[in-house]
Amino acid sequence: MAIQLNHTIVFSVDKKVSADFLCEILGRPAAVPFGPFLGVRLDNGVTLDFMDAEGDVALQHYAFLVSDAEFDQSFARIRERNLMYWADPYRRRPEQVSTDDGGRRIYFEDPSKHFLEIFTKE
């Protein structure tokens, strides 16, 4: 059997708000409750299991490889919400889209301040 990532827990200030945010931005189906989690399933079978944090949230980075069409749709949702976004992980290029690697890439924050990234080319 090949080793595959199955799921990871995403601690959040409010698991429902964060899971709903990710589902909306990425155009995913609604998160599925499972025990104390709300699971957001990705197309490669990995689940992001959102859970309420019992204290401060340790900020993480989550990157999503998307098609050009999915990038356009997600980016439109980000702009509709007037969310801040950057072309670089250092937040030095606000309101820009990176094309440095031949694809497109942006970074933005979720409601718990996790640093999310969508990009079109590995």
Image: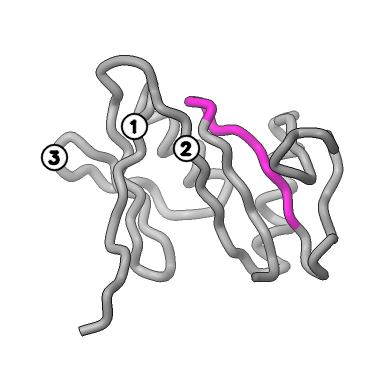
Tell me where the magenta segment starts and ends, as one range.
105-113
Q: Residue 37 lies in magenta, yes or no?
A: no
Residue 110 placement (x, y as % from top left): 54, 33
Earlier residue among tags 2 and 3 = 3
Q: Quick check: marks 2 and 1 in contact, CB under 8 Å?
A: no
Q: Residues within 10 Å of mark 3 (few under 14, many from 20)?
A: few
Relative to 43, residue 34 above or below: above
- Residue at the image point whose x is 83% and y is 50% from the top: 97
- In this view, the residue in front, 104 or 74, is 104
Label annotation for residue 52: none
Residue 22 placement (x, y as % from top left): 50, 43
Relative to 120, residue 50 above or below: above
Q: Nearer the viewer, mark 3 or mark 1?
A: 1
Question: In the rendered structure, which amino acid carries the disc numbered 3?
Answer: Gly
Q: Residue 106 lies in magenta, yes or no?
A: yes
Question: Is 97 left, or right, of 77 in this rendering?
Answer: right
Label annotation for residue 60: 2
Q: CA distance from mark 2 to mark 3?
A: 22 Å
Q: Quadrant of the C terminus?
A: bottom right
Q: Which residue is mark 3?
A: 35
Q: Residue furthest top?
A: 55
- Residue at the image point whose x is 41% and y is 70% from the top: 44
Earlier residue among tags 3 and 1 = 1
Quadrant assignment, res 16:
top left
Is residue 77 visible to us here?
no
Is residue 50 visible to us here?
yes
Q: Which residue is mark 1?
A: 11
Q: Quadrant of the N terminus?
A: bottom left
Dot 1: element: strand
Q: Nearer the viewer, mark 2 or mark 1?
A: 2
